[in-house]
Structures are given as structure tokens and as C-alpha cells.
Image: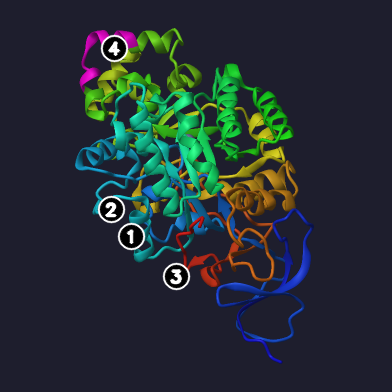
Amino acid sequence: MSEDFDILVRNGNVIDGTGNLWFKKDIGIADGRIRRVGSIPESGRKTIDAKGMVVSPGFIDLHNHSDFSILAYPNAECYITQGVTTVVVGNCGHSLAPIRNPDNLALLRNYLAPLLVSDFDYGWNWKTLGEYYEKIQQQGISLNMAPLAGQGAIRLAVKGFDSNEASREEIGEMKKLLEESLEDGAFGMSTGLIYPPGSYSSTEELIELASVLTKYGAIYATHMRHEGDRLAESLEEAIRIGEENNIAVEIAHHKAAGKANWGKVNASLRAMERARSRGVEVNCDVYPYTAGSSLINATLPTWVLEGGAAKMLERLKDEEVRQQIKKEIAEDTMKYQNMIAGSGWDGIVISECPSKREYEGKSLQTILREKNRFDEPYEGFFDWLLEIEASATMVVFQMDEDDVKTVMRSPLSSIASDSWGTAPAAGGKPHPRAYGTFPRVLGKYVREEKVLTLEEAIRKMTSLPGGKLGLESRGIIREGFWADIVVFDPDKIKDKATYADPHQYAEGIGYVIVNGQVVVENGRLTGMRPGKVLSRC
Ligand SMILES: [Zn+2]
């Protein structure tokens, strides 16, 4: 009997994603799925000779923000050229749904402006999470997307940027919105507890809201309240939210931020292991860089944003407010992470500033020096924020290389990028992780520094994040599973993107296949869009 395969991948070293050592096998693909793994004598419509190459499941990026960029960049070039075939989006409490009314929409757009693609018309014609992802699916995408519901967006829809405690009734409304998102297929709920308005929620409010996740078997993914001085208490809060509701917890981009806190990841990983030993399913993810990236207004105390971004700009003009902000930052009494104290004026570099491109790639220190304002940096900083309407993203140098390796080595951690879609034409200086995360782990941390074995690194990019999310039939090379596959050269794979010159595609990726269709061939994009919006139910 002759089998009919659409694609045959021959002679590769197959690393199946479970952590198993590689084995030499052919893979036969038909109708989007892996149909056979073994020695295949038949021919296929297309044959890929993978001799000397590694054949692995496509990478699953568990922490991604491409829901902000996918309509503008439906080919997700910077991700598929890394071998990423599925992105988990709606992270850090940020999502573009639900939107209940024009007021919500205005607040959301204003606040998230720096994360949106400038000069792109989103249309803004959806209300629910289901409607938003239907729009994405209709446009067509090169990779798969698995959405989370952002708790910040849910709180915003009910309460705007009001920092007061939510009433029983309001919590009830939030639960309804979360339930609706889960019914639409969301895989879980994310929080970003340094970002208003999500940060205004008490632990009790979050426990109550997250109780909705239990019956869906959905996960709780959190950018914790503090990743610096109060890392331990913040982790405790996250674990408590999971434990009281019997839900799985994912600690996003795990790190110890700020020099004074370096080394604390050893204790936090042990705390996660202790929680697991009493039955709480907690994991974390990590990106392979010592700098993070965020909104410029995350440098300010969150009360400054009460009422929304327009209110923040008004406040920044007020002398008393300025003194109060300065005091909290300088005396390090901020309730939330103090990025200026943790990284210094020279450790914060502007990545994208659409209204004033000349600031991109410069540190706050350089910007203030050039303006002759560095002798009074706070006053200079507040004036500069007003000049750019506090709308920019930044790269923050805040981690220790040893900590990055420690988290990477932990069996609990997945590799994830924490970035969003971009393209060389977009300009700016986005964090290089948008182009380099996965090849950087395989080149620098596996081949060069031997921090991880190749098989373990691939497990952290495939079956671990896929299993955590409960993705159906993805993340392992197995007969019957979806044909999301990467073929790469383990001796050549390498990230090229740097902080100074980020818009550079990685090297060493030969083929990327999504749902049985080739999206990257000999390192080049094919322009195919076989991706699917995935749904938990
Ligand atoms: Zn985050």
C-alpha cells in the first residue's frame, strides 16, 4: 500500500520534545498532521532532506504579546524565523478585549498606545475576546495563537482606572466577563500586577475572580506584583491564588530585578518546588537576556495613573505630585517595583517612542544630559515625560547573568520571549528578544556555554509549555499530532539581534512548518498563513 504524504522530512535527528535523546527517523506529514514517524520508503509530494539537521516540534512561546501586533504583522516574521509555531498571547493582564463601551476603549487605547503599532488602523470593531480573535483568524496568520484573558482589561471594562476596592457587584461583573472569555476559548487568565488598573486589585479580589478558572481547568499566568525587593511575598501571593482555587500557576518572565536582589531566584525556585510538593502546579518561564522591557510609565508609582493616561499627564504638571513621586523613587518607598532605583538612569534605554524617534536607543541619563537636565534628573525626567506624553517603551537592564542561567536550568522553567511582533521596517530599538530568544538559547546557552543539553532546551520550548497550557496534540513529534515542526542546524543556529541593532533575523533555521504547511523554507519566508487561533474547548 502506498501512503500519500504531503511532506516527507527525511534523515533528520529527531528530538521529539519530551526530553528524549535524538533518534534518526523520517517524518511523514499529511492533512496538517504527523502521520508517521519511522523509516518511510514511500515518496512525498515534497521532500526535505534533513541530514545533519535537528528536527523538533515547533517552539511554543508561552509568554508573548503579539495580540497587539498581529493585525499589522500577520506573518509574524520575527517569530516564525526563530522556529516559533505557537504564541500564547494576552499576557501581563493586557488584552484588547473585552471592550464594553467607548469609554473603555478610549482608556485602553490611551494606556496601551506604546504597545500598539503606530499609524496602523485596528478598526476597533470588536467587543469580546471571541470577536477579536475571529477577526485575526479571518485575516490569516502564519503561526498559531493561544489567547489568555487579561485581568487588567477585565477590571478596566468594569471599573476604568479607579483604584478603589471592587464591590461584590463589580467582582460579579468581572467574573462574568472572564467566564465569557473562557467560553470563547481562552486558555486562562493573566495578570500584570505592576500595571494599572490590574495592580489596583487586592489579593482577595484576585482569588475570587480566579475561582472562575477552576471548572475550566484554565491556568493563572502572572506578572507578579514585585520582581525585586518583594519577590518572595509576590510569589507567595501568586501561589496562594492558585492553591486556594486548585488551578495551575505560571510565573511570567521569572527574575530577580535590581542589583540588590540578585541571587533571590534560588530561594524563589525552591519556594516553587515546595509548593509543588504540596500539590500546587506552579511553573515559570524565562527569556535569555539580562534586560527586560516595559512601558515607560511603569517607572512611576501606580497611583499616578489613577483615572487613566490623560490624568497622569495632568498630574505630572503638578509640583506637589512631582515632589511626591521623586520622594517615593529616591527614598525607595514605592509600593511597586522601583525601576529607576533598581537600574539607574543609565540602565533604562528608550526602545520605541513613535512621537519622537530621536530618543530611541538612548538611555534616560543620555537624554537628560543632552538637555542639560541631569543635575536635577527628576524635574528633567518629568518634563521629558510631558514632552513625549509618557508614551514610549523602554529596555531595562536589571538582571544578573547567573540568575538567568539558574532559572533556565530549573526543570520548572519554559523558554518564552515576552515580546511582540515587529519588522525591520517598523524601526525603533525593540528588545532583541523579539527576533532572537529561541535561537539564542540554542546557540549561546546550549552550544557555546553548555548551560542546558539540546534535548532539555527543546523540552522547555515545546512539550513543557504545551503541556502547561493543555494544548491539544502539539509540542511533541508523535503520530497524530499537528505538524508544527522546525528543522535547524545545531552547529549554526544563532541569534543576530542586539540591543543596538535589533532588527536582525536569526540564522540556522532551515524549515518551519505550521499545521503541515511550510512557512519558512531555506531560511526564507514563504508568505503562507496556515496558523490557527487555538481554543481551550
Ligand atoms: Zn510582564
Marked residue nearer the N-terminal end (4 or 3): 4
Judging by the rendered image, the residue that carries numbered circle 3 is: 528
Q: What residue type is labelled 2?
A: Trp
Q: Quote the CA–CA distance across marks 3 and 2.
A: 26 Å
Q: Position of residue 34 (x, y in %)?
A: 64, 72
Which residue corresponds to the image point at 60% horizontal and 72% vertical from the top-left? 33
The colour scheme is rainbow
* SS for callout 3: loop
Q: Position of residue 182 (x, y in %)?
A: 45, 49
Q: Residues within 10 Å of mark 4 (few under 14, many from 20)?
A: some
Which residue corresponds to the image point at 37% horizontal and 43% vertical from the top-left? 177
Cβ atoms at labels 2 and 1 below 8 Å apart: yes
Q: What residue type is labelled 3?
A: Met
Judging by the rendered image, the residue that carries numbered circle 1 is: 135
Where, quadrant-wise, is the N terminus in this rendering? bottom right
Q: Residue 126 carries which label?
A: 2
Q: Which of marks 1 and 4 is in front?
A: 1
Marked residue nearer the N-terminal end (3 or 2): 2
Q: Quote the CA–CA distance across marks 4 and 3.
A: 51 Å
Cβ atoms at labels 3 and 2 below 8 Å apart: no
Q: Nearer the viewer, mark 3 or mark 2?
A: 2
Judging by the rendered image, the residue that carries numbered circle 4 is: 322
Marked residue nearer the N-terminal end (1 or 3): 1
In the rendered structure, the answer to whether residue 44 lies left or right of residue 1 reads left
Q: Which amino acid does label 4 sit on?
A: Arg
